[in-house]
């Protein structure tokens, strides 16, 4: 099988493999594309939480992106955790040089266990300077609340938040509705003129570590391969739900999802 597209991931590393750049690589590979990386931070974490975060210098992040893209030009870029305001500004500056139009931003701010991953200054830079420069942003409800400074308790609140983000310059928004105890999850897509609601039954499991990273990478992969943006969102959500259903139960906390759910292994390679 030949990869269908080439994708650059700019994100933090997760030592447990369930989220971050590890989840991104697994997702992009499982969906048939080629993954390249620029690591922005190294985390020590497992399914129970985050122990520490070590930032990579903006200069090294810049080197990773430029040197990689000089050799292999990406068809799309997925951006995850950007630890500081300086890193965000560095990435913005570099994106102008590599000239890839298809850019998806997952505004990672808080880990599954509640650990804050970026500081307030970085959040402000993300809100005021970065969301305007990408093709799609994929915040979950807590992240959308931080970006809009509005509480979100209903679908109507999600619509209001999406419109606020659009006014702030975001071209396309997908607000993920997975937080909460409702039986039906509603994810909301908004592009300034059209609202699409993706509805799915909530799967009862605590093993959802890395769903946000996985979804944004899945959307980026489908988009890079030529699907429309809203169709990419629909297919990405389906892939994540299928991956959650496996319920791997690895670890003592919020376990990872099954990124291999889309792969059928040729008989001669089966274990």
Image (cartoon, helix red, strand yellow):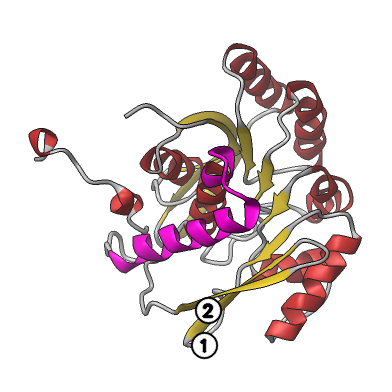
Tell which of 197 and 39 is nearer to you. 197
Q: Is residue 211 left or right of residue 100?
A: left
- Quarter where residue 102 is shown: top right
Query: Dot 2, crowdedness within 10 Å: few (<14), some or many (≥20)?
Result: some
Q: Is residue 194 left or right of residue 125?
A: left
Residue 4 showing in the rendered view: yes
Q: Going 66% across and 71% down the picture, which residue do you hit?
A: 196
Q: Is residue 28 above or below residue 98?
A: below
Q: Going 68% across and 48% down the picture, which residue do you hit?
A: 105
Q: Position of residue 52 (x, y in %)?
A: 54, 47
Q: Is residue 262 above or below residue 143?
A: above
Task: Look at mark 1 in the image and give the residue it sits on.
Answer: 182
Task: Look at mark 2 in the image and give the residue it sits on.
Answer: 185
- Quarter where residue 188 is shown: bottom right
Residue 41 showing in the rendered view: no
Q: Is residue 197 above or below residue 131?
A: below
Overall secondary structure of the magenta section: helix
């Amino acid at each position: 099988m030949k990869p269908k597209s080439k994708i650059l991931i700019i994100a933090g590393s997760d030592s447990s493999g369930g989220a971050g750049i590890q989840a991104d690589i697994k997702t992009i590979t499982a969906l048939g594309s080629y993954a390249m990386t620029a690591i922005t931070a190294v985390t020590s974490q497992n399914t129970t939480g985050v122990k520490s975060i070590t930032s990579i210098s903006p200069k090294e992040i810049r080197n990773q992106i430029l040197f990689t893209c000089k050799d292999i030009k990406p068809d799309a870029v997925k951006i995850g955790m950007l630890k500081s305001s300086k890193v965000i500004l560095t990435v913005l500056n570099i994106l102008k040089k590599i000239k890839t139009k298809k850019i998806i931003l997952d505004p990672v701010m808080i880990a599954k266990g509640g650990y804050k991953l970026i500081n307030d200054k970085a959040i402000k830079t993300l809100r005021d300077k970065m969301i305007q420069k990408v093709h799609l942003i994929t915040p979950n409800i807590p992240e959308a609340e931080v970006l809009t400074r509005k509480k979100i308790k209903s679908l109507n609140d999600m619509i209001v938040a999406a419109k606020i983000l659009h006014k702030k310059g975001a071209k396309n928004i997908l607000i993920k509705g997975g937080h909460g105890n409702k039986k039906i999850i509603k994810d909301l897509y908004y592009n300034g003129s059209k609202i699409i609601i993706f509805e799915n039954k909530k799967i009862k499991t605590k093993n959802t570590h890395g769903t946000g990273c996985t979804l944004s990478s899945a959307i980026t992969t489908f988009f890079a391969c030529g699907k429309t943006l809203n169709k990419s969102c629909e297919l990405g959500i389906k892939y994540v739900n299928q991956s959650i259903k496996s319920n791997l139960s690895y670890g003592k906390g919020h376990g990872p999802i099954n990124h291999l759910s889309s792969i059928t292994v040729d008989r001669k390679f089966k274990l």
